[in-house]
Amino acid sequence: MRSGLLAFALALPAFPSPDEDAWAARFEDLARRYFSSEADRPDTARQLSETLDRAFSRARASAEAADLLGELLETHKRVFESEKSLQARLREAHGILFAWKLKRATGPGLLEDLRRWCAQKKLDEERQKVQALLERVKPPAKPAPDAPRRAQLREQRQAARRLVDDFIAQRARGASAEMRKIVEWMRQEKYAPPEARERLKDLTRRLLGAGGPGVAELTAALDALEHSPDSKVDARRFESRLEQQVVKPLADRLLAAVDKCLAAREPGLGFDLFQYLLRVDPENTRARRALGQVKVQDRWLRPYDAEQFRAGWVWDDRWGWILARERARYEKGEYFDAAAKRWDTIASWNRLHAEPSDPWKLRGEHFELVSTADLELSVKILKRLEDFFLQAFGEYDVFFAKPGSARGADLIFGVAPTPKRLTVHVYRSAAQFKRFASPPTDWAAGYYSGSTGASYFYAEGNNFSVTVLQHELTHQILGEFSDGGAPAWLAEGAAVYLEDAFFQDGVMTLGTVENHRRVVEYARNLRAGRPEHSLRRMLQFVTGRDWDQGDIAQNYRGAGAAVYFLMTFDGGRYRGDFIDFLRDSYFRAGRPIEDYFGLSLETLDFLMDRFYRECTP
């Protein structure tokens, strides 16, 4: 999932509601009927117009409904050309679509696409409105020497993104159609044993989501199938047909898209695609090996996990790494402390390790956790650390790669080991944290220390602040994998961008703008006329002293809004340019921001203001 790249991450994208499916199906049925019966055309045209009333009402309120309306207009344009009474409705429809397209046109690329669309549809007034916006887009007064190369890379990345966008747009419809063919084949062959039906239901849910389009109908059709013991189909033939008709074509398309992403220096997007492929095809060898996984007995493991497994350790979400052969003892409440090299009850270990003088020391692939919290909470935190680590690497992928190197992809995919484990300290209470961690401010709930290279947090009871943890971990990851030289606004903005990451359908994602609470508040304040920092103003927060001036909450909102905008505007076209800027800044080699984006600061400032005033929900 890159947020704004592969926002389903690989959580599933928004599907039309059942109501939208109903009017869309009604429209398609009437459009076919219009040409099959000339005598009934006047009445069919009237019904089409009534259906459009319903469609327009939905499309004004919902971007997904507007997208569906746009697809129907293109698919059935012949009916509008043939029926004069519908031509005025077509102009009305284009007006609805334009309103949504204008909200989405957040940068020069999408604005230019919209200008061409208006010209094609002969929407002169709308085209002039877009042209007025384009006239405010200016290059820097002095273009950077590498501007042509950056523009070329930008187009390569955009081509990779289009490929992924096309896959997202088409996969639901294509998968649903292929599944229906499989069900019909099963009906004809009278092959429907319970295990085959459950296999197909599970695959349908993985492809389309539990509430995806056509899932209920496919499930009902599967339940209605009858199985004959005399069927000539067996389990092997069934799996072969499923593989050839559904899984392999999907895998081939995804793997081709991954190759495009890697060639365009979008390894994070390629990582997301691999993750989605493994949801559909868990045994896909190329995806598993590309992610650095090896097969040990009947399971695929990352290299560190495989090393632990071979040494006799397995991961348990309650106790962390445990001795596989001794699981029964753990179930009885005992625990083997590897550092102390002895067994005792978990309760006894929790009492012993509750003091900072003798804390828990738990190790994961990328982290060493030093914790005085109880074992179960400490293990939960360690797992969150490891999950978040991959999220951070995926979002800021090429930050971790030298220019022209594939190293960033290797690190994300787990092929190359990280150079060191990161140390995280967790205290069992706020009082203990304040006494032993020496936080820089009284209100700090956690912090990263560049001098020690570690981060420090506290828990309260069985809870901890996920947001604070992820914010400070971003500082730690970016700081420890660089020279730590970023200006204050950029370092804080990069951390705010990732702090609200959450799990959806078992995959960590950033969601959409609505899931970024500080960004939402920034946009709300801006629209209400309350003061918020512009991009130009944010660039002035360079040092820690600059950052601590004024309203600190406003500074955090402004930094988060700036980074969210730079990562996602123009459909994410400039995401790679921003990450180059982020990397160079952290390595003390940063240039003016205009050099990276090929746009003047005045232009970026204007686009960000419009982004939050007019374009975000």
Image (cartoon, grey):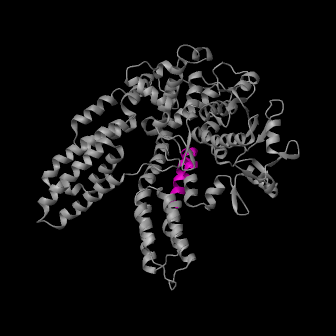
Is 603 placed left or right of 334 in the picture? left
Q: Choose between 264 and 523: the one closer to the eye.
A: 523
Is 364 placed left or right of 64 in the picture? right
Outermost right residue? 341
Q: Is residue 479 visible?
A: yes
Horizontal and vertical percent for residue 166? 43, 52
Which residue shows up at 61% across the image and 29% down it? 584
Which residue shows up at 44% across the image and 55% down it? 211
Q: Choose between 208 and 3: the one closer to the eye.
A: 208
Tell me which segment is drawn in magenta: 252-273
Q: Is residue 265 magenta?
A: yes
Horizontal and vertical percent for residue 477? 66, 34
State the quadrant of the C terminus. top left
Horizontal and vertical percent for residue 427? 73, 31
Q: Choose between 56 and 581: the one closer to the eye.
A: 56
Q: Is residue 115 above or below residue 490?
A: below
Q: Quadrant of residue 544?
A: top right
Q: Is residue 96 magenta?
A: no
